[in-house]
Image: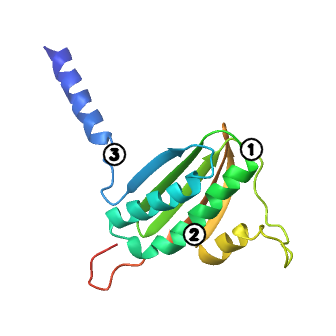
Amino acid sequence: MRPFVALALTLSVCAIAVPLPRPSARRASWPLPPIPASVPRARRLICGQLAEWGIGEQGETARLLVSELVTNALRHAWGPIRLAVSYREGMLRCEVDDANPALPYVRDAHEDDEGGRGLYLLDLLSARWGSERTSLGKVSWFELAIHPRLNGTAA
């Protein structure tokens, strides 16, 4: 009978050692096809998710910056795109994955250029931003600080 007692104790210890997910962490992600219609779809998805989480007041900034990242993925990458958003401890993080491992860089946009200012917007409007290579290409991301609502409830 002793082996069963030891096994039961081991299982109990293992069950206690497994960390529980934090209730304040929220995540969502969506695949996007590599077509121009994915840009407005990404904007709708991000605004809808923020509204569902009760942090829609950051929707306009997040919408603009997600638009920039998805547009960059369409212009400079190939294959499927994935939009992911997470909210944890007052920080919203939006990520766009694509298949091109080349990292974006800030370039000098001239007055007459129609593009080339998206990374400036990321730098100006986000708390932090960047991109990293992955095994399948790269992920570009930004973070926005979400402030608690005035009525005392955390956003």
Q: Which one is earlier in the sequence, the residue at label 3 or at label 1?
A: 3
Check the image and name the residue furthest to the left: 1
Q: Secondary structure at mark 2?
A: helix
Q: Earlier in the sequence, mark 3 or mark 2?
A: 3
Q: Which residue is mark 1?
A: 101
The amino acid on which the numbered mark 2 sits, given as a three-letter code, is Leu
- Kind of residue indicated by mark 3: Pro
Other residues around mark 3 within 10 Å, as few (<14) / some (14–19) / many (≥20) = few
Going by the image, does 63 lie left or right of 105?
left
Residue at 51% of width from left, 55% of height from top? Answer: 41
Please state the horizontal and vertical placement of residue 1, each as a whole percent of the image.
Answer: 13, 13
Give the residue at the far bottom of this rendering.
Answer: 150
Residue at the (34%, 72%) spot, across then down: 155
Q: Which residue is mark 2?
A: 64
Amino acid type of disc 1?
Pro
Q: Choose between 139 and 109: the one closer to the eye.
A: 109
Dot 3: element:
loop
